[in-house]
């Protein structure tokens, strides 16, 4: 049964939080990602990611008691994302016996979408091109014909 408001009840008006001072660009930021702790700077995180720009904007009180930030993500994939943010190096998931791992690339790209990257390297349309090129390269290396990955452009 729904609770009907009592005319005698009073409620506190909702007030926006006062904007907290913004962190300096070179401030060390500690992140808790899937049980692992990562340390980087605000500038590294916010330069390409709308997610981190918003998280570290000072608009919300979202830091944990120790000052770190909880990020619900895969720590293995986040390590590659952080390396990309630091140095612009896109990860290479390649094993000499198995070749490229297109599913790991897809998982990485989905994580990157979650973090709202601004630049095209992590945008959705790019995903199909990467997987298609990896598949094509791998079939040429193996000199075999295998079925292309589902959802890729076969041109």
Image (spheres, rainbow, N blue to C red):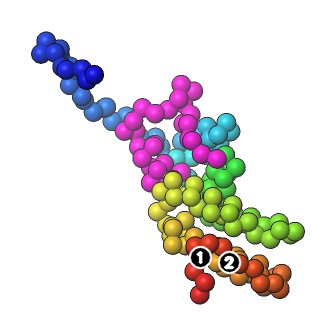
Task: Estimate the x, y position of residue 46 in percent, counting from the top left.
Answer: 49, 52
Residue 88 quadrant: bottom right
Position of 5 relative to 62 (above/below): above
Task: Estimate the x, y position of residue 154 in percent, counting from the top left.
Answer: 61, 84
Query: Taking 21 as reference, is 73 left or right?
Result: right
Q: In terms of secondary structure, where does tag 2 sit? A: loop
Q: Visible in this render: residue 86?
A: no
Where is the C terminus found, in terms of image quarters? bottom right
The segment highlighted magenta reads: 45-74
Task: Estimate the x, y position of residue 147 in percent, counting from the top left.
Answer: 71, 78
Question: Magenta stretch: residue 18 in it?
Answer: no
Task: Give the residue pinned by disc 1.
Answer: 152
Q: Visible in this render: residue 117?
A: yes
Q: In terms of secondary structure, where does tag 1 sit? A: loop
Check whether the beta carbons of the residues at disc 2 and disc 1 lie within 8 A of each other. Answer: yes
Q: Looking at the rendered structure, which numbered label has been put on residue 34? A: none
Position of 50 relative to 148 (above/below): above
Task: Estimate the x, y position of residue 38 in percent, counting from the top left.
Answer: 65, 42
Residue 50 quadrant: bottom left
Name, please, the residue furthest toward the top.
8
């Amino acid at each position: 049964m729904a609770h009907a408001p009592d005319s005698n009840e009073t409620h506190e008006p909702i007030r926006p939080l006062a904007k907290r001072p913004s962190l300096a660009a070179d401030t060390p930021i500690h992140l808790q990602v899937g049980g692992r702790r990562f340390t980087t700077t605000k500038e590294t995180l916010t330069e390409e990611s709308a997610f981190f720009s918003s998280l570290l904007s000072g608009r919300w009180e979202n830091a944990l008691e120790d000052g770190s930030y909880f990020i619900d993500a895969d720590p293995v994939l986040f390590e590659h994302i952080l390396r990309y943010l630091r140095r612009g190096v896109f990860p290479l998931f390649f094993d000499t016996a198995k070749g490229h791992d297109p599913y790991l690339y897809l998982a990485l790209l989905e994580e990157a979408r979650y973090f709202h990257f601004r630049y095209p390297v992590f945008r959705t349309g790019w995903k199909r091109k990467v997987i298609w090129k990896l598949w094509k390269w791998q079939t040429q290396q193996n000199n075999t014909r295998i079925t292309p990955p589902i959802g890729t452009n076969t041109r």
